[in-house]
Amino acid sequence: MKEYQKCAKEMLEFIEKSPSCFHAVANVKAILDEHGFTELKEREDWVPEAGEGYYVTRNDSSVIAFRLPAADLFGSSVSGTVGFHIVAAHSDSPAFKVKESPESMVEDHYVRLNTEKYGGMILSTWLDRALSVAGRIAVKEKNNILTKLVNIDKDILVIPNVAIHMNRDMNNGVAYNPQVDMLPLFADCSEGKTKNGLMKRVAKAAGVKQEDILGHDLFLYTREKGRILGENGEFVLSPRLDDLQCVFAAVKAFAESEPEHYINVCAVFDNEEVGSGTKQGADSTFLEDTLWRIAESLGAGRSEYLKWVAGSFLISADNAHAVHPNHPEKADPTNRPYLNGGIVIKYHGSQKYATDALSAARMKELCSQAGVPFQSYANRSDIPGGSTLGNISTAHVSVSSVDIGLPQLAMHSAVETGGVKDTKYAVDVLKVFYGN
């Protein structure tokens, strides 16, 4: 098996184990633990040591890890440290979130779940698929409230389509109403409804008593497993490629790298798909708080910390649109990334992406050092695009930043398509960045 195929399979396994943002962060923590990193708490003092790695989480859905250089730069002077090498990605993907009191009965026969959209998903792609529920619950345990991961590892839901016989215009385009058309079928209650059946399943899956569950953050997820496909195995097909493909690449490169002078940082934020404006999102103080606490714990004052920030660099890694084989006209005329074409450097004149001439040049140089191809992406000037982590993060920590991604098709579909080589390309270039 070729190295890029092995890397793609590892990435697909990571995604399969990460049906929600909470599971993604738990799996990131497991990788860091395997590499000897130590967990820190925001409410406790930090005493990091040279050459060691640490991580801190927020809300169970975001994590920031850092590793210090092995050289003794932190005695009476910290001036030997140049700054931070940061890679940021996000743990969340568009999905349906389960509402409170979710069960509703239809004509004394069916039980549906009441859900709402999370992020800008392609609604039709969720129809007629085996689905389940995953996330976290808050439970009362003695006199404490704790959180627990939950994944109902079984096909329990489906959102059924309306038959074409009942909507002859189906193939002319359908406007789906998320409160009407997109509610998942959960049970047949014609022989007697089992009240709160979902929460009974959740409690069983989490190993707790149903009456001890005080809150939940639960999401639907598709049960389809990621796979490699194509005439010669050129492509990957998987749920949540955006952005767990970049999360995997960033964490793998980070965990397997050792810095010389820079402090390496890997940040995985939640809530990018809904604007990042939460305490655990890129638009929070999480990154700024963490970087300042690192500097402070190493004996740096505010002025020294600001010098470090001025000498730092951020790579914002969030997937990019590849040229679509059926709609090549949707792509910009001259900036046209393709699957398996390597790292995509993203540009936007109105600064929805943070890339500028200098940060693009640095990224291209890193790709050259890693022997990794790169491509450019820009929106068509008449088609507005989305935003990402770069400019949101740098509004709090003013560092030079570049927005990159891995090329994919069908972004925000229930399943998305990428290139089998591109995950390895990302790992290779990020290892150069972290080891530079």
Image: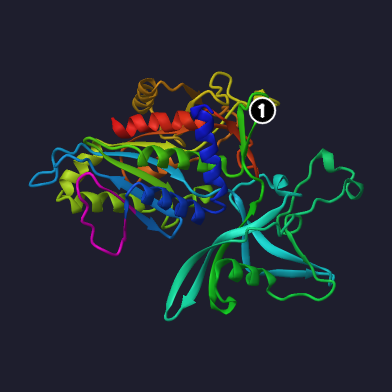
Camera sees residue 347: no
Residue that extends furthest to the front in the rendered view of this protein: 1
- Quadrant hosting residue 399: top left
Residue 199, percent from left and from top: 63, 71
Q: Judge by depth and name the residue closer to the eye, 214 or 191.
A: 191
Measured along the vertical axis of the image, is residue 52 above or below residue 58?
Answer: above
Residue 160, percent from left and from top: 79, 53
Magenta-colored stretch includes residue 33? no
Q: Which residue is mark 1?
A: 230
SS majority, magenta: loop
Q: Quadrant of the C terminus?
A: top left
Q: Judge by depth and name the residue closer to the eye, 234 or 262.
A: 234
Measured along the vertical axis of the image, is residue 60 above or below residue 319?
Answer: below
Residue 155, percent from left and from top: 70, 56
Tell me which segment is drawn in magenta: 39-55
| Position of residue 264 in the picture relative to residue 101 (left or right) | left
| Position of residue 424 in the picture relative to residue 163 (left or right) | left
Residue drawn at point x = 49 percent, y = 56 percent: 22
- Quadrant hosting residue 251: top left
**Residue type of the residue flagged with mark 1:** Gly
| Position of residue 249 in the picture relative to residue 121 (left or right) | left
Magenta-colored stretch includes residue 44? yes
